[in-house]
Amino acid sequence: MDITMTPKCEFYQVCPFFTDSLVAGMPSTAKLLKERYCCDAYSKCARYRVTLDAGEQYVEDSLFPNHDEKAQTIIARVKRETGS
């Protein structure tokens, strides 16, 4: 991690996106997304929203922070299935 980036998200230490296991081979894209979502607007991160609104177990490995529509679909599906 770049020393100038200070994560604000409470889940950054366990997030596969932040720890690079999801973004290997995409350093420029990963850096931009981490700066925007992990270190600034973390409440807008798709992974963060699914974790809070549906549960950590529903965060798909392929979900990137900017996948808003996919996050909304997951949250709606979980709410429908659980009746909450």
Image (cartoon, rainbow, N blue to C red):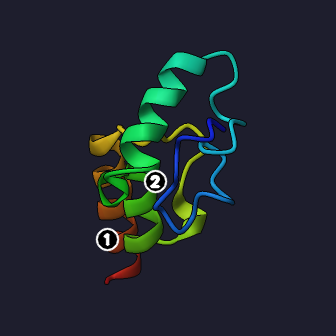
How many numbered discs sit on the rendered protein? 2
Position in image of residue 66 (x %, y %): 35, 38
Residue depicted at 35% across the width and 62% down the height? 75
Crowd tier of the residue under label 2, counting other residues whose Cα lies within 10 Å: few below 14, some 14–19, many 20 or above: many
Up the image or down, 60 lies above or below 9; here it is: above
| Image-based side of 52 in relation to 59, left or right | left
Q: Quadrant of residue 3?
A: top right
Label 1 sits on a secondary structure element that is helix
| Image-based side of 41 in relation to 4, left or right | left
Residue at image mark 2: 47
Crowd tier of the residue under label 1, counting other residues whose Cα lies within 10 Å: few below 14, some 14–19, many 20 or above: few
Taking depth in this image into account, of 73 and 46 the one nearest to the observer is: 46
Position in image of residue 2 (x %, y %): 62, 35
Q: Amino acid at mark 1?
A: Arg
Residue at image mark 1: 80
Up the image or down, 78 lies above or below 4; here it is: below
Q: Amino acid at mark 2?
A: Arg
Position in image of residue 41 (x %, y %): 31, 52
Q: Which image quarter is the C terminus in?
A: bottom left
- Kindly indicate whether the residue at mark 2 contacts the one at mark 1 (C-beta within 8 angstroms): no
Nearest-to-viewer mark from 1 and 2: 2
Up the image or down, 38 lies above or below 62; here it is: below
* Residue 7 numbered tag: none
Label 2 sits on a secondary structure element that is helix
